[in-house]
Every structure is written in structure tokens, then in C-alpha cells.
């Protein structure tokens, strides 16, 4: 088994070194790809220094802040080219517990896409303001109603893909870039009939750094679900 953990970064110098160490401790078969968008705090420089003594760590530096979705697409293409069997998405801020990675990989033995879910077993979120929690929870319900996907946490960003799932999706046709990207990738996998499993995780709001969430990202997600459903009904979802 060859697995790659993709971690997009922008100003994550307070988290990245410790995160890399803990992720690589989870399994000798794990490798990491960091995609850094020219972080002003020199996150990329810190990763380069670690690469000098860690062969399982890789880095792609991008010229500027280009967005979450395009970072993952770049990472997915790299993973396919390099022949990884499993591809994991996770945040750089410890909101996703790296010690849950073995659980994702274990479930991926039976399923094509495994989602670390905040809502599959109640609500498992720590340190979020109540207003943000309500927005996220009802946004997930909104996505389920419009798309008909049987996924309780469609916007979650901690997940594991089988290589075959990513190979089946035309990554050059991805429409979204913010958190809607997570919805779109789930929708495309579900529309193609892949087996999807949610496993419960505890999501912890970042302790260091600044959240990348903003209003435009939310509105992109609101409209994207309609776009995807219409394309599916018209048979033009590539």
C-alpha cells in the first residue's frame, strides 16, 4: 500500500513541522505532499529544511495564493502520476487529528471514498462559536436536500480517496475552488457510483494561525450544489 497525505498550506509555520512529524509517525507507508502558496511566513522554507532528512516528505511551491481546490487538484495529479494507491486530504491546522489517518485507511480497504465526518455520530466539533456551528450544520442539510447525496458531512475536508476515484474524474473540469470543492468531489464520486463511507471524527477549531473562511467561499458552496445537480440531470457532468 502506498498512501499520500496532501496538505495545502498558506501561513502555517506555527503548525506544519509538528503536523508533519505526527502524520509520518502513523505508518511507514505514508508520505506527505505539502502544497504551499508562497506563504509570507515561509512555511515552504520550513518544509524544505525538513525534506533534507525526510525522504517521505515532498513539496510543491506555487507562486501565490491560488485556492484550496486548485491546490488539491495539483496534488491529485501528482498522486496519480506517482502511482499512490490512497490519497488523503487534510488541513494543516490540526483541526483534523492525524492520529485518525489509520482509521481512514482501514475503512478504505472496503470503500472507495472515506470521509472523516463531523456529523455522522451527532455533532463532534470543538471550539466553534454557536453561530458558525449552526451555519455549518444546516449547510450540510441543505447540500443533502439539493443533491440527494446520502452524506451527512459533505463539506468536510478530511477524507481518503482510492486512486481509481480520482482517475475517473476529469480533474481539469472541476468547477469550484473553496469549500464547495469538497462538495463537488463527493458529488462526482457519488454520481459515478463509487462506494462512500463516513466515519466519525472530532473536529477541533485551529489553535494557531488564522481561519481561511470568508463570505465568498460560503456563497460559492450555496450555488455550486445547484450547478452540479443541473449538470447531472442534463448528463453533462464530466
Image (cartoon, rainbow, N blue to C red):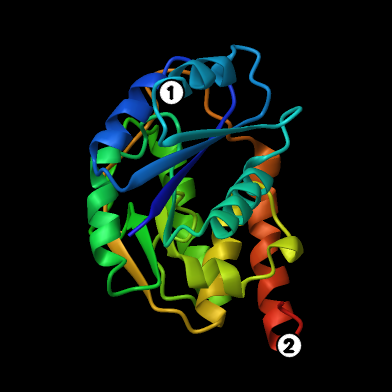
Quarter of the image for residue 85 reads bottom left
Q: Quadrant of the C terminus?
A: bottom right
Quarter of the rendering containing residue 53: top left
Foreground: disc 2 or disc 1: 1
Taking the spot 66% from the left edge, 77% from the top edge, the residue there is: 229
Secondary structure at numbered mark 2: loop
Left or right of 80 in this view: 173:
right
The disc, 2 or 1, on the residue closer to the chain's N-terminal end is 1
In this rendering, position of residue 119 left or right of residue 173: left
Q: Nearer the viewer, residue 85 or 222?
A: 85
Q: Give the number of the disc on residue 16.
A: 1
x, y percentage for residue 148? 51, 79
The image shows residue 75 at horizontal and vertical percentages of 59, 48
Marker count (numbered): 2
Residue drawn 75% across the image and 62% down it: 172
Residue 174 point in image, percent of width and height? 71, 61
In the picture, measured across the screen, residue 133 lies left or right of residue 202, that is right
Q: Residue placed at 34% from the left, 45% from the top?
A: 30
Q: Residues within 10 Å of mark 1 (few under 14, many from 20)?
A: many
The residue at which mark 2 appears reads as 235
- The secondary structure type at the circle numbered 1 is helix
Q: Is residue 111 above or below residue 13?
A: below
**Where is 132 relative to 194, above or below?**
above
Amino acid at each position: 500500500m502506498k498512501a499520500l497525505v496532501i496538505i495545502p498550506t498558506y501561513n502555517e509555520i506555527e503548525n506544519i513541522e509538528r503536523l508533519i512529524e505526527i502524520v509520518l509517525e502513523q505508518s511507514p507507508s505514508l508520505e506527505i505532499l505539502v502544497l504551499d502558496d508562497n506563504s509570507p511566513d515561509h512555511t515552504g522554507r520550513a518544509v524544505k529544511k525538513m525534506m533534507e532528512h525526510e525522504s517521505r516528505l515532498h513539496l510543491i511551491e506555487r507562486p501565490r495564493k491560488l485556492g484550496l481546490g486548485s491546490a488539491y487538484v495539483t496534488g491529485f495529479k501528482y498522486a496519480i502520476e506517482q502511482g499512490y494507491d490512497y490519497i488523503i486530504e487534510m488541513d494543516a491546522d490540526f483541526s483534523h487529528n492525524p492520529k485518525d489517518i489509520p482509521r481512514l485507511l482501514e475503512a478504505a480497504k472496503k470503500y472507495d471514498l472515506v470521509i472523516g465526518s463531523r456529523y455522522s455520530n451527532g455533532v463532534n466539533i470543538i471550539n466553534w462559536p454557536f453561530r458558525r456551528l449552526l451555519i455549518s450544520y444546516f449547510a450540510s442539510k441543505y447540500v443533502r436536500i439539493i443533491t440527494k447525496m446520502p452524506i451527512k458531512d459533505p463539506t468536510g475536508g478530511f477524507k481518503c480517496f482510492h486512486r481509481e476515484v480520482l482517475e475517473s474524474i476529469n480533474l481539469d473540469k472541476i468547477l469550484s475552488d473553496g469549500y464547495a470543492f469538497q462538495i463537488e468531489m463527493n458529488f462526482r464520486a457519488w454520481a459515478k457510483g463509487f462506494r462512500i463511507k463516513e466515519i466519525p471524527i472530532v473536529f477541533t477549531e485551529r489553535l494557531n494561525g488564522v481561519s481561511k473562511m470568508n463570505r465568498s467561499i460560503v456563497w460559492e458552496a450555496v450555488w455550486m450544489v445547484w450547478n452540479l445537480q443541473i449538470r447531472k440531470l442534463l448528463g453533462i457532468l464530466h
